[in-house]
Amino acid sequence: MSDRPSIAVVGVGAIGGAMAAALGDAGHAPALCVRTPFGHLSRRLNGETRTYAHRVDADPAELSHMDWVLLCTKAHQIASAAHWLRRLIGPDTRVAVMQNGVDHIERVSAYVAADQVVPCIIFLPVRVEEPGLVKQGRAGTVQVPESQAGRALADLFGDQSAVKVEPTADFLSTVWSKLVMNAVGGAICALALKPMSAVAATEVRELAIGLMEEVMRVGHAEGASFPEDFVEKTIERVRGSTGGHWTSMAVDRREGRPMEWQARNAVVGHIGQRHGIRTPLNDALTALRAVIDAPSD
């Protein structure tokens, strides 16, 4: 009998596919929990395609409580995964929430206790080529809190090189720093239907800076810290190496899918209200994307 932990990956799109492949590289065989079944999982990385014999499940009744659940849906898709979470999560299950935003624990509070949750920040260029096939641009990292559960997740991924899980002492600052770019890049690029270089365009520079400063003010109130030159360095980055990247939110709008604005901009306004901090720019861009996503009459 195997003494390896039981693992389920819920949501096997780009991130879920990459995580399941990395777990396969580390010697695990996670159950892949999907809405629409596919034959097998494959990952392209560094010119090599690897195929994995992971079990693909579309029916929660076929599974039971797991040691680990990796929740890899987008933040606004958790409700559609509720039937999986209720089936898979037991009193000893650890849940790695692999999503954007800063409110990972609150999002899954209806399904799992806070001390069972490992919030994750993903730095990983990957896209779905077709169902069951993901193309990973380079090795990625997942940053998690420096805790027993965070270290346990890092151990789960072992010494394979496709995805490294890194426990981080100042996770709060890391998660808010990522939100700054997600909030600004996601909003501007989705509305403009342009790649990340749009953030550095002369016409929107003041808007981009204003959005960043709003997010940073709320982050400071939550206890996060940022380098003094954080805004300028962020804009310089999108002028250079990341300028051609399309955010997932811009791709979702381009493809006619709902966007992840709740976890990227709406959350800034909600947390800002708790601290008495106004966030008019984030609120305005939240409202515009809510109208875009609203069903047509």
Image (cartoon, rainbow, N blue to C red):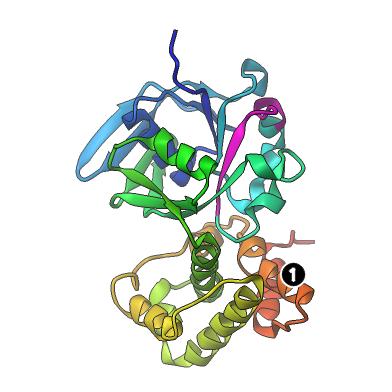
Image coordinates of residue 152 in percent, x first then y, are 47, 37
What is the quadrant of the N terminus in the image?
Answer: top left
Residue position for label 1: 270
Number of numbered tags placed on the structure image: 1
Identified at 28% across, 52% down, the residue is 138
Of the residues shown, which amino acid type is indicated by label 1?
His
Residue 183 location, quadrant? bottom right
Does residue 94 show up magenta in the picture? yes
Question: Quick check: 263 left or right of 230?
Answer: right
Residue 164 forms part of the magenta stretch: no
Q: Is residue 267 above or below residue 282?
A: above
Q: Residue furthest left?
A: 47
Whether residue 289 can be seen here: no
Q: Tag 1: Cα neighbours inside 10 Å, few (<14), some, or many (≥20)?
A: some
User: Which x, y percent locates residue 37?
Assistant: 52, 27
Residue in front for this viewpoint, 92 or 42? 92
Which corner quadrant of the image does residue 283 belong to? bottom right
Viewer-side residue, 271 vs 153: 153
Q: Quadrant of the C terminus?
A: bottom right
Give the left or right position of residue 171, taking residue 19 as reference.
right
- Above or below residue 118? Residue 254 is below
Q: Quadrant of residue 214?
A: bottom right
x and y, in percent, of residue 225 in the image: 52, 75
Q: Is residue 273 left or right of residue 186?
A: right
Whether residue 106 can be seen here: yes
Q: Secondary structure at mark 1?
A: helix
- Left or right: residue 254 versus residue 82 is left
| Boundaries of the magenta span | 86-99
Name the residue at 43% across, 12% down. Answer: 2
**As drawn, 219 above or below 71:** below
Q: Residue at x 44, y 85 (%)?
A: 228
How far from the left and from the top, in percent, is residue 204?
50, 88
